Amino acid sequence: MTQLPVLPLIIPLATAATTMLLGRWPRVRQAVSILGAALLLAAALALLVRVEREGIQVMQVGRWPYPVAISLVADLFSAGLVVLSGLLGLAVCLYSVAGMDAARKAFNSEAFMHVLLMGVCGAFLTGDLFNLYVWFEVLLIASFALLALGGELAQIEGAVKYVTLNLIASALFLAAVGLLHGLMGTLSMADLAQRLPRTPQPGTVAAVTVLLLAAFGIKAALFPFFFWLPASYPTPPMAVTALFAGLLTKVGLYALIRVFCLLFAHDFAFFQPVLVAMACITMMTGVLGAASQYDFRRILAFHSISQVGYMLLGLALFARQGLAGALFFILHHGLVKSSLFLVSGLTHRLRGTHDLKALGGLQGSHPGVALLFAIFALALAGLPPSSGFFAKLALVREALAQGRYVSVGVALTVSVLTLFSMTKIWAEAFWKAPPVPVTRSAPPPRSMVLPVGALALGVLWLGLQPGPAFGLITRAAEQLLSPEGYILAAQGAAR
């Protein structure tokens, strides 16, 4: 039995506890936070390599028999998302050295970040629905604390909306868990995958599916549940928002993909039209909301909604190429959207505002920041040969193969409107002359620029050399569509 799946939980927990003990030494606390994030990334990479070479890794916690035992299960999908969590966690921790104000650091924002990373990794790795609920609550508590840290009015307002909708999601999730346990007598996902197709009460299973779709739809900010996202993302420091944008909605999407591929694949045809419609409407509402904004952060927040629609479309197509496109899109979006929020933090550092109408001239005064924005903006819009282009190409090809021409039309239209929004930011913030004369500001600190530059190199590599990542992701999609390996691994680890 391998112990690797538990390391992405132990490392951030130990890091959070250590930073709490170092409250009087902020510089030492920052160093410990960065070290913890680096160790998390190293453990995640080791886990992904082990899964790629030896197959699905399972760890049974405690001495209980299967399927009662608490299981940690790492397949290519979950291990890859843990790597993404470690990478973004390290980038944000480095950025926060200068990108987080002293007042929030005094409340030990580092500890909350690592508790959030622990909750995210736990959600990706858990093998049963009840512990998925538990990890959802862990990351909800940490994310609420990070949203409210600082106590500004806009933050409190955004945090209240965020936590209210997410508590509703938690209640729906818990109701679904209770119904499933009462019906099947188990919450192990591997065990449920074998029992659910044979249940004599398909109506109850359909009701559970609707409850989970609503609960995870709120977490993923899908239509019509997305209202919390544009209200909350623009309010905290950009380091916090970048972590949220890269990971929070991905947890909801992960849960949707996992339960539909593993638990409800036998009944997927019934829900497929609903998922396709939700995906298309989410894409359109998000991008139209972005087109109406003139605040850098709010444009990016609304685009987070529209991009989630692409990922849901990949699940709704329920085929190898479409699902691989969705997984590639999750990786691409996690890197690109987090980086764009970090770039918006750089522009705020330089000019003190997020209002596009009050910005201007950054291309001439800070060409490096302009170049970073251009790399991420073109990738978000999906221009070739960016990572976004290959993610959208896989989705469009599968949708065309299935004859879903309306979905293709919506996906392409949203890409054009996304390019329009990114062009608006470029024209207003970087290209036009500033509305009032500004003195030349000092370049942003290296601790803020270097992690964004490293993410830019990763995005460029993903676009110029998509083959290795796409090959691994295609294998992850095949594992999802053929869940027998997941079930056998979970059962075998208990023997």
Image: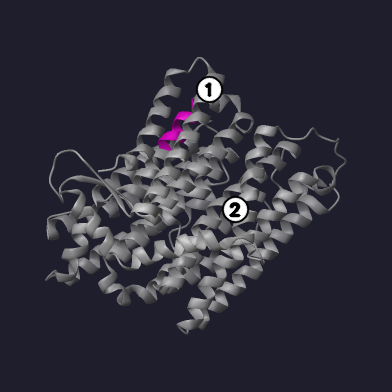
Q: Which residue is mark 1?
A: 106
Nearer to us in this view, 232 or 444: 444
| Range shown magenta | 108-116
Q: Does the rendering let one see residue 404?
A: no
Is 297 on the left or on the right of 2, as rendered? right
Task: For label 1, count other residues whose C-alpha is less than 10 Å away and answer few (under 14), some (14-19) or many (20+).
Answer: few
Nearer to us in this view, 384 or 344: 384
Query: Residue 193, located in which quarter of the rendered image?
Result: bottom left
Viewer-nearest of discs 1 and 2: 2
Where is 2 relative to 288, above or below?
above
Dominant secondary structure (helix, strand or loop) of the stretch shown in magenta: helix
Residue at 44% x, 63% y: name it.
224
Where is 230 relative to 366, above or below?
below
Is 188 on the left or on the right of 414, as rendered? left
Closer to the chain start, of discs 1 and 2, is 1
Residue at 66% x, 65% y: name it.
385
Query: Residue 393, located in which quarter of the rendered image?
Result: bottom right
Nearer to us in this view, 495 or 39: 495
Where is 42 relative to 276, above or below?
above
For the residues labelled 1 and 2, say whether their Cβ atoms are less than 8 Å apart.
no
Q: Amino acid at mark 1?
A: Ala
Q: Which numbered marker is on residue 336?
A: 2
* Magenta-drawn stretch contains 114: yes
Coordinates of residue 302 in the picture (x, y in percent): 57, 57
- The residue lying furthest to the bottom in this view is 403
Is 165 on the left or on the right of 456, as rendered? left
Q: Amino acid at mark 2?
A: Val
Tell me the SS state at disc 2. helix
Question: Where's the N terminus, which quadrant?
Answer: top left
Coordinates of residue 49 in the picture (x, y in percent): 42, 49
